[in-house]
């Protein structure tokens, strides 16, 4: 059994910050690529940020310069630091983990609401 649990969502004013966490647990011998997704118009989910096992990262254009993805392999955890938040960032954010080379595990999501 492998599980992913997100935390850190909440309500924040425009321009504020949040830090999301995603912790993987269970029968993990290899923690590979990890990513954050959110719903988008015309899509079920869009990729927000992704980080590979060697630490390389990529972001969707709308969050570049504002969001930072990082990982702590000792804790099997990935983070998403979100700064300068905008109302259009409001969404449920989902963590996706690739573990043991082939297995994909999704979290249940954490709600981020940006509103004045």
Image (spheres, rainbow, N blue to C red):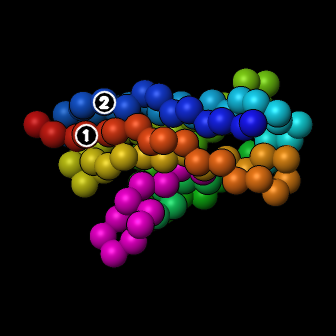
- Residue 82: x %, y % from top left: 41, 39
The number of callouts visible is: 2
Which residue is rendered at x = 32% and y = 39% of the image? 112
Neighbourhood count class around disc 2 (C-alpha, 10 Å): few under 14, some 14–19, many 20 upward: some
Q: In the rendered image of this protein, does residue 102 appear above or below residue 28? A: below
Which residue is rendered at x = 71% and y = 29% of the image? 25
In the rendered image, which residue does mark 2 sit on?
Answer: 10
Q: Are marks 2 and 1 in contact (CB under 8 Å)?
A: yes
| Residue nearest the viewer, comparing 33 with 105 | 105
Q: Quadrant of the N terminus?
A: top right
Which residue is rendered at x = 54% and y = 42% of the image? 107
Provide the residue span drawn in magenta. 35-45
Residue extending furthest front? 1
Q: Quadrant of the C terminus?
A: top left
- Residue 113: x %, y % from top left: 25, 40
| Residue nearest the viewer, comparing 43 with 114 | 43
């Amino acid at each position: 059994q492998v599980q992913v649990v997100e935390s850190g969502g909440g309500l924040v004013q425009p321009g504020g910050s949040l830090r999301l966490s995603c912790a993987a647990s269970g029968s993990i011998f290899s923690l590979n690529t990890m990513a954050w997704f959110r719903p988008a118009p015309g899509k079920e989910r869009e990729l927000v940020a992704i980080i590979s096992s060697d630490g390389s990262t990529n972001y969707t254009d709308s969050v570049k310069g504002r969001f930072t993805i990082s990982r702590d392999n000792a804790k099997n955890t990935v983070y998403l630091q979100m700064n300068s938040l905008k109302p259009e960032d409001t969404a449920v954010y989902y963590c996706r983990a690739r573990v043991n080379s082939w297995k994909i595990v999704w979290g249940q999501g954490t709600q981020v609401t940006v509103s004045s």
